Image (tube, helix red, strand yellow):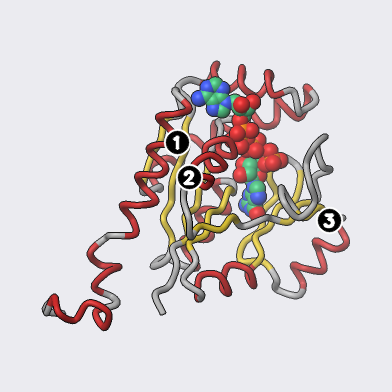
Amino acid sequence: MTKGILYVVSGPSGVGKSSIIKSAMSKLEGFSFSVSYTTRPPRPGEVNGKDYFFVDEKTFNKMIENDEFLEYAKVHGHMYGTSKKYIKEKINEGMNIVLDIDVQGALNVVKKMPKETVLIFIAPPSYSELKKRLMNRGTEKKEDLIIRLNDAKWELSKINEFDYLIVNEELKEAINQLISIFIAEQIKTERVTEHLGRYSFFKIEEE
Ligand SMILES: Nc1ncnc2c1ncn2[C@@H]1O[C@H](COP(=O)(O)OP(=O)(O)OP(=O)(O)O)[C@@H](O)[C@H]1O
Ligand SMILES: Nc1nc2c(ncn2[C@@H]2O[C@H](COP(=O)(O)O)[C@@H](O)[C@H]2O)c(=O)[nH]1
């Protein structure tokens, strides 16, 4: 069975990751979103099990102890983690998985699963535009907003460690770029030739 691809989408808070991912995924089949665990309180309208699994610190720490996370990190003052079981199961079923995680998490995932992982960085057109988007979203208190904008500086310094860079100026263009990456990665020669059994009539010489 062909293994799925792990698309890790990362970038500063408020840059538009969720907006881009949701729209791109609604237009494609065979992609599954990895719902993270977090200790952050839910925002109005967020649904447990859909946006996140909202858990308390005790439960999160127990999950760390039980080695249930592929990666976890403290992000902007709260804990966030990716379920190891979900990722391993889906990827082995041949499902492509999309992760919306922070830069520390992204760099940890690629260390653990280098062959399956594609790292995509979403950047804002400017720092002032990032600030504007976060303020307009209105989901954070002033002190949390300052933390997120400060953390963005370190995150932006890691762009070069990513495979792809999307500058989210025009939302529609950013969505199209993400869809293009999703599709192009699926037809990379190295991925196709890994499964020569299915395409043996090509007679591709293996080194
Ligand atoms: N290209 C764009 N132009 C203007 N506004 C945008 C654009 N893309 C996204 N937004 C808006 O910016 C805000 C932040 O977007 P979103 O919540 O998707 O960011 P995020 O990167 O997922 O944030 P976080 O990491 O905090 O979850 C939202 O209000 C969204 O509607
Ligand atoms: N390392 C991880 N980061 C994660 C995970 N799930 C989400 N995130 C990132 O946290 C910030 C803040 O998200 P918000 O919903 O509170 O605005 C954002 O950058 C997410 O990408 C995870 O499992 N691991």
Asked whether residue 64 is in view, the answer is yes
Q: Residues within 10 Å of mark 1 (few under 14, many from 20)?
A: many
Disc 1 or disc 2, which is closer to the eye?
2
Q: Residue at x 84, y 56 (%)?
A: 55
Residue at 71% in and 47% down: 51
Q: Position of residue 87 (x, y in %)?
A: 58, 67
Which residue is tagged 3? 55
Q: Amino acid at mark 3?
A: Val
Q: Nearer the viewer, mark 3 or mark 1?
A: 1
Q: Earlier in the sequence, mark 3 or mark 1?
A: 3
Q: Is mark 2 within 8 Å of ligand 1?
A: no
Q: Is residue 25 above or below residue 147?
A: below
Q: In the rendered view, does 50 fall on the left or right side of 151?
A: right
Quarter holding residue 172: top left
Corner quadrant of residue 170: top left
Q: Which mark is residue 175?
A: 1
Please, what is the three-letter code of the amino acid marked with disc 2?
Answer: Lys
User: Tag 2 or tag 1, which sits nearer the N-term?
Assistant: 2
The residue under label 2 is 27
Measuring from the top left, give residue 206's x and y in whole percent.
15, 80
Residue 65 or residue 199, whichever sits in front: 199
**Above/below status of 172 relative to 80:** above
